[in-house]
Image (cartoon, grey):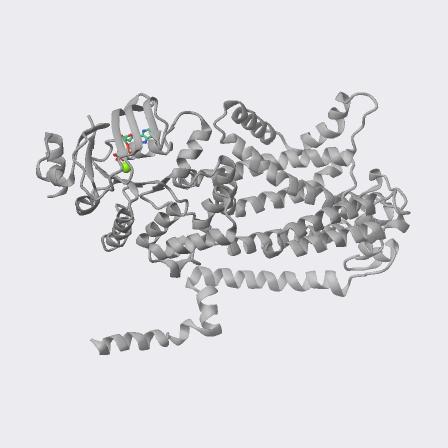
Amino acid sequence: MEEIVENFAAEEVKPPVASVGVMGWVKENLFKGWFNSFLTVVILYLLFKVIPSIFEWMFIDSVWSTTGEGCREAAGACWSVITDNLRFIIFGFYPYDQQWRPLIAMFLLFGLLFYSRNRKHWNRHLAYGWLFGLFAMGLLMRGGMFGLSTVESTKWGGLPLTLLLSVFGLTAAYPLGVILALGRQSKMPAIKILCVVYIELIRGVPLISLLFMGSIIFPLFLPEGITIDKIVRAQVAIILFTAAYIAEVVRGGLQGMSRGQYEAAESLGLSYYLTMRLVILPQALKIVIPPTVSILISAFKDTSLVAIIALFDLLRTTQTVLSHPKWMGFSPEAYLFIAILYFLGCFSMANYGRKLEKELSTEY
Amino acid sequence: MSEEGPKTTDRSGSMEVMIEIIDMHKWFGEFHVLKGINLTVEKQERIVICGPSGSGKSTLIRCINRLEEHQRGRIVVDEIELTNNLNNIERVRAEVGMVFQHFNLFPHLTIVQNLTLGPMWVRKMPKKEAEETAMHFLNKVHIADQAKKFPGQLSGGQQQRVAIARSLCMNPKVMLFDEPTSALDPEMIKEVLDVMIELAREGMTMIVVSHEMGFARSVAHRVLFMDFGQIVEGNTPEEFFKNPKHDRTKLFLSQILH
Ligand SMILES: Nc1ncnc2c1ncn2[C@@H]1O[C@H](COP(=O)(O)OP(=O)(O)O)[C@@H](O)[C@H]1O
Ligand SMILES: [Mg+2]
């Protein structure tokens, strides 16, 4: 008996050479069967064809700091379209000599976001930090106090505007979506119907039509003399739109909860509010982190639709540069650049979602 | 239909009423689940309810802490009548602990957090005190060494003992058990029953839905048999097992006792 056991153990310690190391990995992942081998060869060939020319276009033949004319003579990419117009792309029509203000505001925002990554930091102090941070950002952007000149919101644009719309859009849409999801599950018919109608109505129309309604139709109904900032209207449209989708995702999570969890909480004497807050939502929201992140990512990208109602977000400022005769024709470079910015945003969100999921996991 | 059989002796003389159910009916839609339940449970009394699946045992004990609403008759728990008055429901739930077949621990919280949740948020107990209480009861169910783990890391028997401790942390006057061992692997049943027997020794008022007849014999003052939404008969364990009166009871006993 003992001998056999030892034999097994010995075999486990030393697996066949072919299944380990670089060779093992290559064989397992690239050349397993004739079909995979064929795919590998084809793809390697394509990469070999494509990568060098892309590399040449991007780095070897490219120009980084010439004028529009200089660009037309270059064989490679014209990065000048970005370097030359960077401040306009990033800040839009914000007064040139004041652009340090949105810059600081953005750094403040990034700092706060970065600090908030760690769940251990989620406490009262962080909440105050955000309150103070938001106030400071608003003050920096808008001015009109402490010797800062006033900059009307019509002049805001570029990356700060995109960040404003997305950060507020997403952070406001999430709790609203959760409330709508709870409302949809409510035993009170009036609340339930209201939530269902809201969610289905909003999901039934594209975001663009909400933005148009907000920017064109809504002002018609306002009493004379009252105007609501255009950015606010777009912001509200984004929040209302995203919330409906969040609500449906969260509802899915709520449906995944067993009756037993509610009953255990109830029999401990927890009220509805406490049951939801302490028992149901922490679990339900955790289950739906992946689809929630998907929705937040697509909402982040959808903020670029505000370009249609003439808000100068990052996409629109880029397009404005490209419509200048001097820079016409260099859209690949410019779009590549903002694609990278958007990618960084989306990628960090996806990453953070995965991190949260892992941290909150109690499965073993 | 309920019968007040003779009580075994170990309850101290006081015969105060803990739970009183009078002609209670419940329907699920058109379906008449409970058909006129009459039951009086005295302080420190221990009752085991058995009966075929679907006879309404769970529904009956779930009515006692208002997880289900009854439609006719009265349920009075420690002089508080269960009506639509939310305040009363809250007070009753604070006095009645419940242990479920599937434990229903909160999987996102550690064991000790499972135990402190109720005391901290319902009883407004300071965290430190709640944790001390939690450790006290975890010790009592012999599982204090698992306090920092999550429910998913524990065996079924351990989880059920945690569930019992979680209820005890709320300092209940009555404990309801709904088939607490029927989801457990056989080798874990004893560890849970042992905890329940200890609890019984300390004088807890208990209503236990269970088919563990050994447990019923050693702990119960009365065994009730339910069928088709009624309490068919109830008696001391000795009488109940030796001389069942109704044919349905005899049939049922012959089935579960082989
Ligand atoms: N929420 C419910 N809705 C409708 N019928 C139910 C519900 N819960 C239980 N029932 C029905 O009521 C009857 C009694 O159920 P239950 O009290 O769980 O029986 P037991 O615990 O004795 O097995 C069963 O026929 C069951 O199908
Ligand atoms: Mg049952």
Q: Quadrant of residue B63?
A: top left
Q: Is residue A342 above or below residue A20?
A: above
Query: In this rendering, would A313 be left or right of A117?
Result: right
- Residue under the point 39% across and 44% down: B171
Q: Is residue B231 above or below residue A297?
A: above
* Residue closest to the far front: B13
Task: Answer with the quadrant where ligand 1 appears in the image.
Answer: top left
Depth check: A137 or A300 in front?
A137
Query: In this rendering, would A28 be left or right of A99?
Result: left
Query: For the C terminus of chain A, which image quadrant?
Result: bottom left
Depth check: A334 or A162 in front?
A162
- Residue under the point 34% across and 55% down: B140
Query: For the N terminus of chain A, which image quadrant?
Result: bottom left
- Residue under the point 33% across and 34% down: B62
Residue A72 spot, x, y in % from top left: 84, 55
* Residue closest to the far left: B243
Residue B200 spot, x, y in % from top left: 27, 46
Q: Is residue B118 visible?
A: yes
Residue A125 spot, x, y in % from top left: 67, 52
Depth check: B72 or B169 in front?
B169
Residue A138 spot, x, y in % from top left: 79, 44
Query: In this rendering, would A105 be left or right of A98?
Result: left
Q: Is residue A333 visible?
A: no
Query: In this rendering, would A364 be left or right of A91?
Result: left
Depth check: B31 or B142 in front?
B142
Q: Quadrant of residue B19?
A: top left
